[in-house]
Amino acid sequence: EHAQHIHPDDYELFNDERIIASVQPIHCISDAASITEKRLGERCKYAYPWKSLYEQGVKLISGSDFPIESHNPLIGIEALTRRIPFGSKESWFPDEILDIDTAVKTYTDYPNLATETSSSLGKLKADYLADMVILDKDIYSYPEISKINILATFVDGKRVY
């Protein structure tokens, strides 16, 4: 939980010990300048190493850290794909940005690895539980993902919103 500040020498430990890296992407955009840079200084280059972990084969799952941060996963997906801190216009350590497909999977498909429910959740597929949202924009082509509206939510195939 909170796999945020990891030295590159430690990446292999995740695979060696079969550790799943649970990340809260919103912390990167809310903490980057105000906390991380002030407390870590030069070491902040090791903060939120999402792409580096993923490229090393580490399993990444994302969450919100609600009630500390917003529960909205769209903010987290945007953080993973843009890394633009609140109040800034530029990406913070953009080499660690994930592509949109991987970012979405850290919230949908990959968490099932931690709960051993991969046979029934995380995908829109026959015999899977239909947990999904309908969005007003295409998440794969609209960069300001946090501004996308959720039009409907389905849990186990039933509309709940």
Image (cartoon, grey):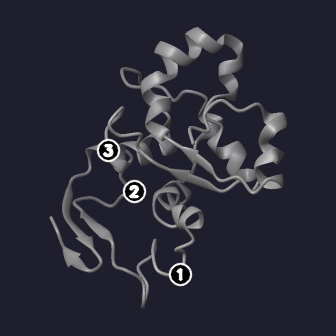
Check disc 2 and give the amino acid type: Ser
Q: Secondary structure at mark 3?
A: loop
For mark 1, what is the residue? Answer: 119
For mark 2, what is the residue? Answer: 141
Q: Secondary structure at mark 2?
A: loop
- 108 is higher (above) or lower (below) than 2: below
**Which of marks 3 and 1 precedes in the sequence?**
3
Q: What is the CA distance from the residue labelled 2 to the residue labelled 3?
A: 23 Å
- Answer left or right for 79 relative to 139: right
- 112 is higher (above) or lower (below) than 58: below
Residue pictured at 79% horizontal, 53% vertical: 17
Q: What is the CA distance from the residue labelled 1 to the residue labelled 3?
A: 25 Å
Please indicate, yes or no, whether residue 67 appears anywhere in the rendered image.
Answer: yes
Q: Mark 2 and 3 residues: CB-CB less than 8 Å, in contact?
A: no
Please indicate, yes or no, whether residue 84 appears anywhere in the rendered image.
Answer: no
- Answer left or right for 55 relative to 89: right
Q: Nearer the viewer, mark 2 or mark 1?
A: 1
For mark 3, what is the residue? Answer: 71
- Label 3 neighbourhood size at 10 Å, few (<14), some (14-19), many (20+)? some
Residue 9: give x, y in percent of width and height: 84, 35
Residue 86: give x, y in percent of width and height: 38, 25
Q: Secondary structure at mark 1?
A: loop
Q: Which mark is residue 13?
A: none
Residue 96: give x, y in percent of width and height: 63, 39
